[in-house]
Structure formats: structure tokens, C-alpha cells
Image (cartoon, rainbow, N blue to C red):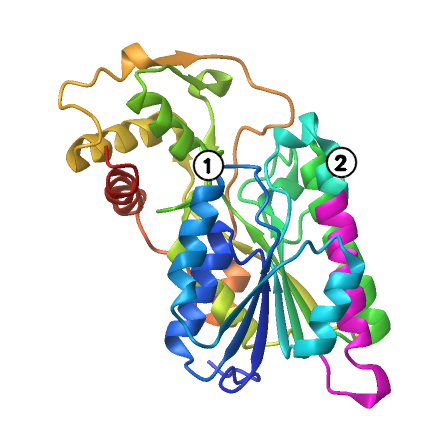
Amino acid sequence: MKYDIELSGKTVLVTGAAGFIGSNLSRRILEEYGDVRLIGVDNVNDYYDVRLKEYRLQELAGYQNFIFIRADIADAAAVREIFEKYQPDIVVNLAAQAGVRYSIENPDAYIQSNLIGFYNILEACRHSKDGGAAGVSHLVFASSSSVYGDNKKIPYSTEDKTDLPVSLYAATKKSNELLGHAYSKLYGIPMTGLRFFTVYGPAGRPDMAYFGFTDKFVKNGTIRIFNYGHCKRDFTYVDDIVEGVLRVMRKTPDANENGVHFKVYNIGNNHPEDLLEFVQILKEELVRAGVLAEDFDLAAHMELVPMQPGDVEVTYADVTELVRDFDFKPETSLREGLSRFAAWYKGFYGV
């Protein structure tokens, strides 16, 4: 694989550095590239348990070349100041308000973070080239499998139409792709968008199904399985996501048919799992880790309910382009990934 960006000696800016993917990516970069200066930015909001974000940041604090800045990317002045002071070579924008259901309850958070915040990053990348400066050589940003909406064609391909979002979250992520292409075209900023498919793993997001289900089981509660269990998800283990992002960071996109160095990829496991089977494997691994009792009755803690607004039946990534361009395809099995999560959960919460 030929890469055109050498990370050694560079300044890398990662927004959302206290987040699930951002913290794992930051740690991987710091471990592999001792001479990279990594600037982590996060507003450490309380969308979910702040202790998890503090735990992730604590793991990064031991690296001498890690600089953490508590700031909100929706604050244009703060973003400008960070870019002017540190002059990043590569930017990975992972800061965003996540979650489909929460976008129905609190749409303002999505406009602020996902639209205004991303616009501020684009503007900062644009002005990094003022006065003939080299500026940002590659902007990698998080999109989402949610942009596919109710797409009936399976698996989802980046060639598919994505102009019928079924949630505000999806609409903001599609907007990121459109804004990114325009800025790449106008200002010559090489840009790559990544459509993530249901990322999971240790120290993940508590609003994700596997984490929320575990919390409910531990508290002897009942989980709800939507669409009466007729859902499939392309679960992608976080280490696979990080490997994919790291490879993408080091290779700018070739010019497309319009001469724009802009590209969008799917990063998914390319193997959708039945939700009921997923819950069964989760329960087995939680029992194996000692989080749940051997005689835990799954059926007694599960309720099958109708589909909820904004959700879709299937997510399934076509990763042909990712394999072709980066010789990479996620490979961690669901059981292996959930086993690692269960072991972490037991240690973190002392169950």
C-alpha cells in the first residue's frame, strides 16, 4: 500500500478526543508515532456519563506529546485559536452529537455540533492555507451509516442515493458530506468522509444497544427489542474502526471526475447480525465474564416491541472500496468483541 502522508513528526488534531472512537484513535496514534504531536479537543458534555470520558482522557494523559483542550467546536473563536496556535497538518473531526433517538428529543444539539461545529472546522482548514501556508493536508471526518435511511438495496454502497434521511442526525451527517465536498472543491482541501456502522467495544457509549442492554440486565430490568426482533446491524469493533481511520488518514483521495480530492467510504463489518442472536451472544459473554449469573433468564428480561421512529431494519456495509484502496476489512468477530466488552465492564463497574 502506497501512502502519501507520513505521520511522523506531524501535528494531528483529533476532535471528539474524549469520545469512544476519538480516544481509541488518539491512543493508537500516540503509541505508534512517538514524535507526533496530538492535539485532542472535546467539550466533555454530559450527553452520557462523564466518568467514561474522564476515564478515556486519563488513559491519554500519560503521553507527553498529547495536548488536551476542553473546547466546543461550535465556538468559532476557540476553533480559530486552536488552529492558529498549533497549525495542524492533519485533522480528524469526530466531534459530533451522536444518536438517532436523541435527535428527536433535542434537535438543537445536532445543529450546534454537527452543522455549525463542522462548518467551523471547514473554515479553519480553509484559512490554514492563508498567505501561502501549507495548511491542513488532509481532513478526515465522521459520517454515519444513518445517511442511507430506508434504502432497500442491501448491502449499502457509497454509490447509493442518500437524499432521503429518516432522522435529523442522518440529515446532519449527509450535510457534512455535502459541505465537505464543496469546501474541498473551492479551497483544495483533500477530504475523506467515513460512514461508520454501529461501533462497539470496551468503554463505549452507554446509549448504544449492547451497553444499555448490559446495564438493564445488571439492574434486573427488561430490555426492549424493536421491530419484534426483525432487525440486523453491521456491528463493527472499535479497534477495526481505528485501524481503518489510521490507514485513511495517511492517504489523500485521488481526484474524482470533477477534479475534487474528496471521497466517502463505508467502514463496517460487512456481516449484519440478527439482533436476537446478538443479544444471546451478549448474554453468554456477560455470564462468562461473571457480570451475570449462570442461571440468568434472558427471555424473562426481554420484550419485543414495534419499530421506533427514525430507526431502520437493516444496516449492512459494502466495503469493496475500502478493501480495494486500503487493503483492509474489519475482521473482529461479534463474540470476540463482546467478550472484550464484558471483561472491561466487569472491571470498570466492579460488578
Residue for point 57% across, 84% down: 4
Foreground mark, 1 or 2, reads 2
The relative height of residue 100 versus residue 141 in the rendered view (above or below) is: above
- Left or right for 40, reference 339: right
Circle 2 sits on which residue?
A: 108
Spatial CA span between label 1 and label 2: 27 Å
Residue type at tag 1: Arg
Residue type at tag 2: Asp
- Return the x and y of residue 190 as percentages of the image width and height: 70, 74
- Return the x and y of residue 164 as percentages of the image width and height: 75, 36
- Return the x and y of residue 108 as percentages of the image width and height: 76, 36
- Left or right for 110, reference 187: left
Number of residues whose C-alpha sits closer than 10 Å to that of mark 2, classed few (under 14), some (14–19) or many (20 or more): few
Taking the view exactly as shown, the residue that stands out farthest to the left is 294
The relative height of residue 141 versus residue 230 in the rendered view (above or below) is: below
The relative height of residue 342 versus residue 331 in the rendered view (above or below) is: above
Q: Earlier in the sequence, mark 1 or mark 2?
A: 2
Residue for point 77% across, 49% down: 115
Q: In which quarter of the image is residue 216?
A: top left
SS class, disc 2: helix
Number of residues whose C-alpha sits closer than 10 Å to that of mark 1, classed few (under 14), some (14–19) or many (20 or more): many
**Quadrant location of the C terminus in the rendered image:** top left
Q: Does the magenta stretch include residue 132?
A: yes
For this rendering, which residue is in front, 95 or 263? 95
Query: Bounds of the magenta span?
Result: 112-135
Circle 1 sits on which residue?
A: 233
Tag count in the figure? 2
Q: Do the residues labelled 1 and 2 touch (CB within 8 Å)?
A: no
Q: Does the magenta stretch include residue 334?
A: no
Magenta segment's dominant SS is: helix
Residue for point 29% across, 37% down: 349
SS class, disc 1: strand
